[in-house]
Image: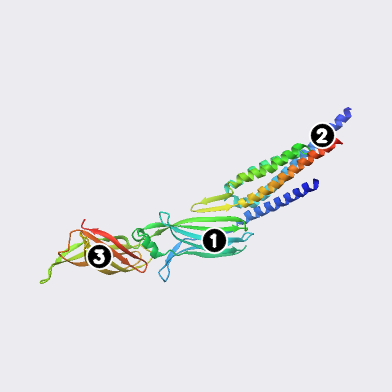
């Protein structure tokens, strides 16, 4: 009985470590992708000062959600967080849409860049993400119900 | 259920990857787009039309073409009224291509000077708004606006008809007359030489035309013009006050009457 309890807690610990490791790897990979992409955008960012801040906030929250989702994977909370993540993308994009036109004025010159089309596309892809998360949640609940019946 | 979820997942990932790569490359390529707006210049065409020219240089070293490039210029006076507008349309600037163009705007000098007489007599500032709009990577609208101000020199700056000097002319056997000498001066601050005629009509205090004089004028750019007009007027019609009506006729504009009172 004691051995079985020890074995269970060992398995749980192993699972926890594995999830934490996965979460860390995912977080690091996402940050690396962000870091590489920022190197490309960097020359443009100095002309659009607010844009960097917006992207940084987005990436921070998104990576945090990815890590937490990974930590609770295999539970219903994973699907809640997946949906939350997809909604976050949509809401953040909607927030950006208000200022989808970035402007810069230097002396007697002003530059305006309109990136609203990208934001709309991102929002639509975000909706696909929501659909996927909802379907995953339904599938998860279905599986649980089937297991209970059996 | 698993397969549709997987398909949606794959589709979402593909869309995200495409969107991120495209947006990053489009933004990255924007740094290699150079737009230079030169100093505006004004000149006169052989047929005496005013020509505002702004050199525009667009160099596209980015990864994508620039489409619907539209260079427009608007000339405004100090009250923000549009006095001229012009635009140049370039359908495509391909990647690696450089386009140098001169944006010409031709304000109708005659209409301008006749509609806004303060341009004839007062130096002022003209504001020139230049806008370059285009679509980068076919989908990202970019707009660069620049505002210059350019001094406007009046062709009849400080136009003055001086105090008339009356000198009696006594010719035996004829009615008494007066020779009235009126000094006329102005400075030509315009960017063109002014040639034409000036016609001055002299009215007495009862609005009766008592004398008329026409004179050719020629004032080079940035020079002063001083001339005296002479009227020979019967003494019976002369009053100590009245007014002059001045009419200008030049290749650029016809203006008049400019009413200048005297003796008050």
Furthest-left residue in view?
B172
Let me know if residue B159 appears in the view: yes
Quarter of the image holding residue B239?
bottom left
Do the dots labelled 2 and 1 sit on one chain? no
The disc, 3 or 1, on the residue closer to the chain's N-terminal end is 1
In this picture, is A115 found above or below B47?
A: above
The x and y percentages for residue B32 are: 60, 58
Q: Nearer the viewer, mark 2 or mark 1?
A: 1
Q: Nearer the viewer, mark 3 or mark 1?
A: 3
Q: Which residue is mark 3?
A: B201
The chain under label 1 reads B
Answer few, some or many: residues within 10 Å of disc 3's Cα (few below 14, many 20 plus, some between 14 and 19).
Answer: some
Quadrant of the drawing holding the C terminus of chain B: bottom left
Element at label 1: strand
Instruction: Name the disc covering residue B20, or none.
Output: none
Instruction: Name the disc covering residue A12, or none.
Output: 2
The x and y percentages for residue B11 are: 74, 51
Q: Nearer the viewer, mark 3 or mark 2?
A: 3
Q: Which residue is mark 1?
A: B70
Element at label 3: strand
Quadrant of the drawing holding the N terminus of chain B: top right
Q: State how far apart marks 2 and 1 are (Cα).
A: 65 Å
Q: State how far apart marks 3 and 2 are (Cα).
A: 110 Å
The x and y percentages for residue B49 are: 42, 67
| Direction from residue B185 to residue A127 in the image, left or right | right
């Amino acid at each position: 009985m004691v051995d079985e309890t020890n074995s269970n807690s060992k398995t749980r610990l192993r699972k926890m470590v594995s999830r934490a490791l996965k979460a860390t790897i995912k977080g690091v990979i996402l940050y690396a992708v962000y870091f590489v992409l920022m190197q490309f955008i960097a020359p443009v960012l100095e002309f659009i000062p607010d844009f960097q801040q917006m992207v940084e906030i987005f990436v921070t929250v998104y990576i945090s959600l990815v890590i937490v989702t990974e930590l609770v994977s295999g539970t219903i909370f994973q699907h809640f967080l997946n949906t939350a993540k997809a909604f976050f993308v949509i809401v953040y994009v909607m927030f950006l849409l208000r200022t989808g036109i970035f402007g810069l004025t230097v002396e007697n010159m002003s530059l305006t860049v309109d990136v609203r089309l990208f934001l709309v596309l991102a929002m639509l892809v975000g909706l696909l993400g929501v659909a996927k998360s909802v379907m995953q949640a339904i599938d998860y609940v279905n599986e649980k119900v089937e297991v209970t019946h059996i | 259920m698993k397969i549709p979820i997987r398909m949606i997942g794959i589709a979402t990932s593909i869309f995200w990857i495409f969107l991120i790569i495209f947006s990053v490359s489009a933004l990255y390529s924007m740094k290699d787009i150079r737009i230079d707006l030169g100093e505006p210049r004004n000149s006169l065409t052989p047929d005496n039309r005013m020509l505002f020219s702004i050199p525009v240089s667009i160099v596209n070293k980015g990864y994508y073409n620039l489409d619907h490039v539209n260079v427009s210029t608007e000339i405004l006076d100090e009250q923000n009224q549009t006095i001229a507008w012009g635009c140049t349309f370039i359908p495509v600037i391909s990647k690696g291509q450089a386009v140098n163009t001169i944006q010409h705007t031709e304000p109708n000098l005659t209409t301008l000077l006749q509609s806004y007489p303060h341009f004839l007599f007062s130096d002022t500032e003209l504001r020139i708004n230049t806008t370059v709009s285009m679509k980068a990577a076919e989908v990202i609208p970019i707009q660069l606006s620049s505002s210059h101000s350019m001094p406007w020199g009046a062709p009849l700056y400080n136009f003055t008809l001086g105090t008339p000097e009356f000198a009696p002319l006594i010719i035996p056997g004829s009615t008494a007359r007066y020779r009235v000498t009126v000094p006329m001066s102005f400075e030509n601050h315009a960017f063109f030489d002014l040639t034409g005629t000036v016609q001055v009509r002299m009215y007495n205090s009862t609005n009766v035309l008592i004398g008329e004089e026409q004179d050719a004028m020629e004032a080079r750019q940035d020079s002063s013009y001083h001339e005296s007009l002479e009227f020979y007027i019967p003494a019976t019609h002369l009053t100590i006050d009245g007014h002059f009506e001045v009419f200008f006729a030049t290749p650029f504009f016809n203006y008049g009457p400019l009413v200048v009172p005297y003796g008050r």
